[in-house]
Amino acid sequence: MSDKLWIFDTTLRDGEQVPGCQLNTQEKIVVAQALEALGVDIIEAGFPISSPGDFNSVQEISKAVSNPIICALSRAVEKDIEVAAAALKYAKKGRIHTGIGVSPYHIQYKLRSTPEDIIARGVAAVKFAKRFVEDVEFYAEDAGRSEPDFLCKIIEEVIKAGATVVNIPDTTGYCLPEQYGAIIASLKNNVPNIDKAIIATHCHNDLGMATANTISGVQHGARQVEVTINGIGERAGNTSMEEVVMAIKCHNSIPVYTDIVTPKIYQTSRLVSKLMNMPVQPNKAIVGRNAFAHSSGIHQDGVLKHRENYEIIDPKEVGVDESTIVLTARSGRAALKHHLDALGVELEGEELREVYEAFLVLADSKRDIGRKDLLELVGKYMDES
Ligand code: KIV
Ligand code: ZN
């Protein structure tokens, strides 16, 4: 039997921290409503203490959205937590996400503190947040580079203090999938009260491992994943929601399911890209322009014979109408015939061979061959015959 995997979207918090991606409150509401329609379970709507605008956005999103839990970020600081709680006043289901750095780097150089003090501050923050909301998530910042026994200890203590979710961020995107999975496994095996909380993954993509690390975390017992649309986020970005959701959908061996309405993935990706003015790279998995485009002759022939020869996902499953057979100098005769048939020009044998030869000459001099080019090519040969 598979478990529910909670989808925590931080497009509007970690994603929106990216330079140039800032949204106004109205735009954030539009994104939050799209995330709700997509079936996201938790929306991290902002970091209310950071600015009056962010406070206002968390408050307005709380009013505008009903189903998902609305989450507000805070440091392990009473003032932050109070402001986060105030911003969540109208949320039907509100969560405070508070935490502190736990790696030797953060403890020594950022917080200039001691491990004992960090535990005390983490516990105090969770207890303080519990005065305002039942649902309190604790983040152990830079857990990916933390000392394992210390991580287990602080997680045990914050759960005792009432944390309902414990977030284990690979803040710097440092881990390899095996390492990240081992951190989650170590928490599962060594923290006596771990089953009282949900373990969350929160991976950054500095080494391009965010999705792999997240999946590894889930395979080792995490049941919440923190993700963004299109993988936007600090530096190289956060884990991309569409990649994790579809990886889980494609692999029954991962014993979880999500409630994401996958046919809405593509439109949500476009919306976020447009509003945040952040183009999606053409070869981006699932939502890139080329994710379902076939350009080499061998692949085109294969996919035209049977889609699954070269596609592991039906494009409709993620809201893309159909795969595309791109015409380039690498295309084969099958691809050309496919396009000609679509234009209502059914050529076979010698005629097709002649048009194909002319097509190759043209394609060598032009990157993309469009409808107009094809009509010209066919027109010429038709006229001559
Ligand atoms: O990457 C990180 O550690 C974070 C925390 C604030 C959750 O974004
Ligand atoms: Zn982060």
Image (tube, helix red, strand yellow):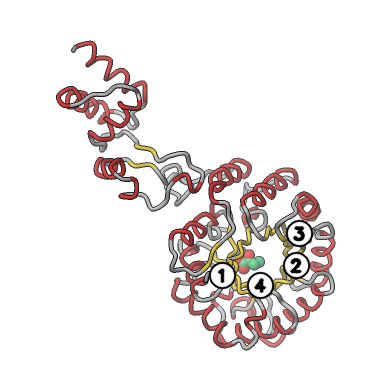
Task: Give the image quadrant in which the ligand numbered 2 is located.
Answer: bottom right
Which element carries disc 2, helix, strand or loop?
A: strand
Q: Amino acid at mark 4?
A: Tyr
Which residue corresponds to mark 2?
96
Residue 222 on image: x %, y %: 56, 73
In the rendered structure, which disc, 2 or 3, sits on the residue that comes first in sequence? 3
Q: Earlier in the sequence, mark 1 or mark 4?
A: 1
| Element at label 4 | strand
Crowding at dot 1, Cα within 10 Å, few <14 / some 14-19 / many 20+, comes out as few
Query: In the rendering, which numbered label is found on residue 100?
Result: none
Q: Amino acid at mark 3?
A: Ser
385 and 78: which one is in front?
385
- Return the mark for residue 50: 3
Viewer-proximal residue, 363 or 255?
255
> Which label belongs to residue 3?
1
Q: Residues within 10 Å of mark 2 (few under 14, many from 20)?
A: many
**Image quadrant occupied by the C terminus:** top left
**CB contact under 8 Å: marks 1 and 4:** no
- Can you tell which quarter of the image residue 119 is in? bottom right
Residue located farthest toward the top when viewing the structure as drawn: 383
Task: Say whether residue 180 is left or right of residue 87.
Answer: left
Residue type, mark 2 in image: Ile
CB within 8 Å, label 1 to label 2: no
Marks 1 and 4, how far apart in space? 22 Å
Ligand 1: does it lie within 8 Å of the C-beta at label 4?
yes
Instruction: Judge left or right: residue 287 versus residue 153.
Output: left
Residue at disc 3, CB closer than 8 Å to ligand 1: no
Q: Which of the 4 image quarters holds residue 297? A: top left
* N-terminal label among 1 and 3: 1
383 lies left or right of 130:
left
Q: Read off the residue under disc 4.
A: 139
